[in-house]
């Protein structure tokens, strides 16, 4: 690239500032953040400190940023779910290309409106379905397209959310209540709907879904549970969901082990142990998981039928030790199994020796989502440097997965009724 692509950021939270903007730090020749907006002054301070954005280019709201003349090539829209489309539409009118955090919107009409505006303006609108940009799913998709297991017959995918991630994001955190954000199958698992559509290589025809919020509710609180974990809870020692364990002492997630990164960075900007304890005493992340205002499901299954008699199952469950995805694809000539945490795929062609693809062998620095966050940024910067286009996860492709997810939620709410997508 002759010069870096310039970016403004609407929403300097965990995704905008922690997942996508850091690509500039390792690839300054490709990306430069020049402006940003957030309602929290401390996030704007981080924008200035980490990325060198002048104070005069930091704005206290999306509206204030979007009231300015066009300031960059690209607008990253990484606000809360129900704010995405309004900001993206205004940014398109200003002449920005858009990098849009998923989901587009829980409202299908808004998704369609963004499609139309993208076509009208001719600007790139790429949705952050980062899994397509990982080595894991890219190799899997290539094996399937090459016909290594013949015609695809079934796909079985599981999203292991992890007990602590469910507690953090979907019980205590920003995405706990679908009336404020999106249903779980869209907010968390539109990634998976997108991947299933991509791997199948064919449109989805029908969906059916079951699921519920089974565990994280008041009637399941053990005797002696306090409203907040630091308020003398009698169940604290035995409870794996104890906030002090998750954010302070657990070596995988706590400030003493993981350090300043996610999830602790969500509780405080540049967190330390004192800041974490202060947040647990007064903020939402210190609440008992049985005494929150959450309503999203903690487990859900979806059955899907794709064109060409391809059938898939998807399971999302909170109740796993680790945060990972696993998959098995069967075909007329073989099968492929994969574990994203191990970054490995196993190909078994019927009657032949199995072959394992260890996708860690090439080394390199992984970003979040198995390398997908930086994979997305690299692809997107190249796309914009060439003048734009649809990209691997353009808005048209993304809307398909949103239709699948929203139809699955409608099915779940209607007792598992089978829904044909053509009439949805």
Image (spheres, rainbow, N blue to C red):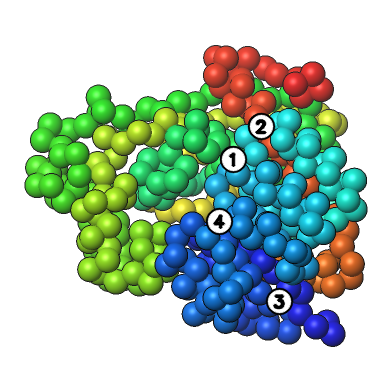
What residue would you read off at disc 4?
A: 61
Q: Is residue 106 above or below residue 129?
A: above
Circle 4 residues within 10 Å: few <14, some 14–19, many ≥20: some
> Helix, strand, or loop for circle 4?
loop
Marks 2/4: CA–CA distance: 23 Å
Q: Position of residue 7 (x, y in %)?
A: 70, 69
Marks 1/2: CA–CA distance: 8 Å
Task: Pick whichever of labels 3 and 2 is earlier in the sequence.
Answer: 3
> Helix, strand, or loop for circle 3?
strand
**Residue 371 falls in which quadrant of the image?**
bottom right
> Helix, strand, or loop for circle 2?
loop
Relative to the observer, which residue lies in front, 373 or 36?
36
Residue 258 appears in the rendering:
no
What residue would you read off at disc 3?
A: 31
Marks 3/1: CA–CA distance: 27 Å
**Residue 273 falls in which quadrant of the image?**
bottom left
What residue would you read off at disc 1?
A: 82
Q: Position of residue 48 (x, y in %)?
A: 52, 77
Marks 3,1: beta carbons within 8 A: no
Q: Nearer the viewer, mark 4 or mark 3?
A: 4
Task: Pick whichever of labels 1 and 2 is earlier in the sequence.
Answer: 1
Task: Pick whichever of labels 4 and 1 is earlier in the sequence.
Answer: 4
Marks 3/2: CA–CA distance: 32 Å
């Amino acid at each position: 690239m002759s010069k870096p692509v310039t970016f403004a950021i609407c929403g300097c939270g965990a995704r905008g500032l922690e997942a996508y903007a850091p690509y500039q730090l390792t690839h300054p020749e490709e990306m430069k953040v020049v402006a940003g907006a957030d309602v929290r002054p401390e996030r704007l301070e981080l924008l200035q400190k980490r990325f060198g954005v002048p104070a005069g280019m930091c704005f206290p709201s999306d509206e204030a940023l979007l009231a300015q003349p066009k300031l960059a090539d690209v607008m990253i829209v990484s606000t809360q779910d129900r704010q995405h489309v309004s900001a993206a539409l205004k940014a398109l009118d200003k002449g920005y290309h858009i990098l849009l955090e998923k989901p587009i919107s829980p409202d299908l009409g808004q998704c369609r409106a963004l499609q139309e505006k993208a076509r009208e303006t001719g600007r790139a609108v790429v949705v952050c379905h980062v899994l397509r940009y990982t080595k894991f799913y890219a190799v899997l998709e290539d094996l399937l397209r090459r016909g290594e297991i013949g015609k695809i017959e079934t796909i079985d995918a599981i999203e292991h959310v992890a007990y602590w991630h469910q507690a953090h994001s979907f019980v205590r955190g920003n995405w706990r209540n679908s009336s404020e954000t999106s249903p779980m199958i869209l907010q968390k698992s539109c990634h998976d709907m997108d991947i299933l559509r991509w791997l199948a290589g064919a449109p989805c025809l029908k969906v059916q879904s079951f699921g519920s919020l089974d565990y994280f509710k008041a009637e399941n609180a053990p005797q002696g549970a306090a409203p907040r974990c630091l308020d003398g809870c009698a169940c604290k020692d035995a409870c794996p969901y104890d906030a002090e364990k998750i954010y302070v002492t657990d070596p995988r997630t706590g400030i003493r082990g993981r350090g300043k990164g996610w999830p602790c960075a969500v509780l405080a900007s540049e967190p330390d142990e004192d800041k974490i304890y202060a947040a647990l005493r007064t903020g939402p992340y210190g609440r008992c998981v049985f005494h929150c205002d959450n309503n999203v499901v903690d487990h859900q299954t979806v059955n899907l039928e794709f064109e060409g008699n391809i059938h898939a199952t998807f399971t999302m469950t909170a109740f796993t030790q680790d945060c990972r995805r696993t998959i098995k694809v069967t075909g007329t000539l073989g099968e492929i199994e994969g574990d994203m945490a191990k970054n490995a795929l196993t190909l078994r062609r019927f009657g032949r020796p199995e072959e394992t693809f260890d996708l860690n062998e090439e080394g390199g620095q992984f970003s979040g989502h198995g390398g997908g966050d930086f994979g997305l940024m690299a692809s997107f910067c190249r796309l914009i440097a060439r003048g734009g286009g649809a990209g691997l996860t353009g808005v048209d492709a993304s809307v398909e997965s949103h239709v699948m997810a929203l139809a699955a939620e409608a099915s779940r709410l209607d007792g598992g009724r089978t829904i044909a997508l053509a009439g949805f």
